[in-house]
Amino acid sequence: AQNPLLQLHRLWMVLRSASGCARVCGCNETGMLERLPRCGKAFADMMHKVDVWKWCNLSEFIVYYESFTNCTEVETNIVGCYWPNPLAQSFITGIHRQFFSNCTVDRAHWEDPPDEVLIPLIAVPVLLTVAMAGLVVWRSKRTDQLL
Ligand SMILES: *[C@@H]1O[C@H](CO)[C@@H](O)[C@H](O)[C@H]1NC(C)=O
Ligand SMILES: *[C@@H]1O[C@H](CO)[C@@H](O)[C@H](O)[C@H]1NC(C)=O
Ligand SMILES: *[C@@H]1O[C@H](CO)[C@@H](O)[C@H](O)[C@H]1NC(C)=O
Ligand SMILES: *[C@@H]1O[C@H](CO)[C@@H](O)[C@H](O)[C@H]1NC(C)=O
């Protein structure tokens, strides 16, 4: 059984990337797939400085992991794509597989972040979207009144 919140989060990411923004916002997926491996390479270089037996202990390399995540976000945004998106996520999953495939104990942790992490992750973009839609309606109503 999967965490329903996590499923909702995945669904949200798919919806966001499927909302036509790939074209409208000029998301260059080719460019993204070219750039992401640089992040993976930098992360691999840093991980190789960490003893292999520590690879399942997140606190040993959380700094590297955060800078890797940040790198994927920055590079994804440079080519005009949203982050996260399914392509970037499958790249990140590949990196996880490469380094953490033997971390059976931690797997649940990687795939099922606690609800305290997921709720803002889902709620914030949803609320923002609702707020934006409300703003558009409000502004069009106001324009109606002015005209
Ligand atoms: C997308 O990125 C690729 C690789 O960097 C580049 O060759 C191509 O010109 C880009 N396409 C657009 C529309 O910017
Ligand atoms: C993980 O690394 C931290 C920091 O070095 C250490 O304090 C902790 O005991 C380690 N945990 C395990 C389970 O090895
Ligand atoms: C992410 O990386 C960019 C560019 O390297 C940097 O300017 C920014 O401060 C970083 N953000 C975080 C949260 O580390
Ligand atoms: C996982 O374990 C297998 C078998 O012991 C080993 O060949 C492989 O290199 C390990 N992978 C990682 C990422 O540690």
Image (cartoon, helix red, strand yellow):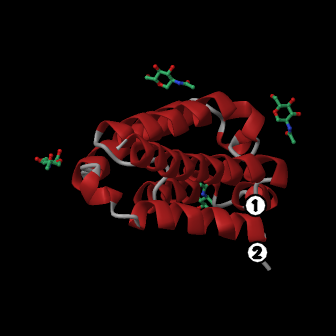
10 Å crowding of disc 1: few (<14), some (14-19), many (20+):
some
Within 8 Å: ligand 4 and the Cβ of disc 2? no
At a point 47% along the width and 43% down the height, the residue shown is: 142
At a point 47% along the width and 49% down the height, the residue shown is: 141
Residue 112 shows which numbered tag? 1
**Discs 2, 1 touching: Cβ within 8 Å:** yes
Q: Is residue 75 visible?
A: yes
Residue 2 shows which numbered tag? 2
Residue 134 shows which numbered tag? none
46 vs 27, left or right, is right
10 Å crowding of disc 2: few (<14), some (14-19), many (20+):
few
Front one among 71 and 137: 137
63 vs 108, left or right, is left
At a point 74% along the width and 40% down the height, the residue shown is: 58
Helix, strand or loop at mark 2: loop
Q: Amino acid at mark 1?
A: Asp
Res. 100 image quadrant: bottom right
Residue 101: x %, y % from top left: 63, 61
Res. 65 image quadrant: top right
Residue projecting furthest to the bottom? 1
78 vs 63, left or right, is left
Compare marks 2 and 1 and give the one earlier in the sequence: 2
Residue 117: x %, y % from top left: 77, 47
Helix, strand or loop at mark 1: loop
Say which quadrant the C terminus sits in: top left
Q: Amino acid at mark 2?
A: Gln
Say which quadrant the N terminus sits in: bottom right
Quadrant location, ligand no. 4? bottom right
Front one among 120 and 126: 126
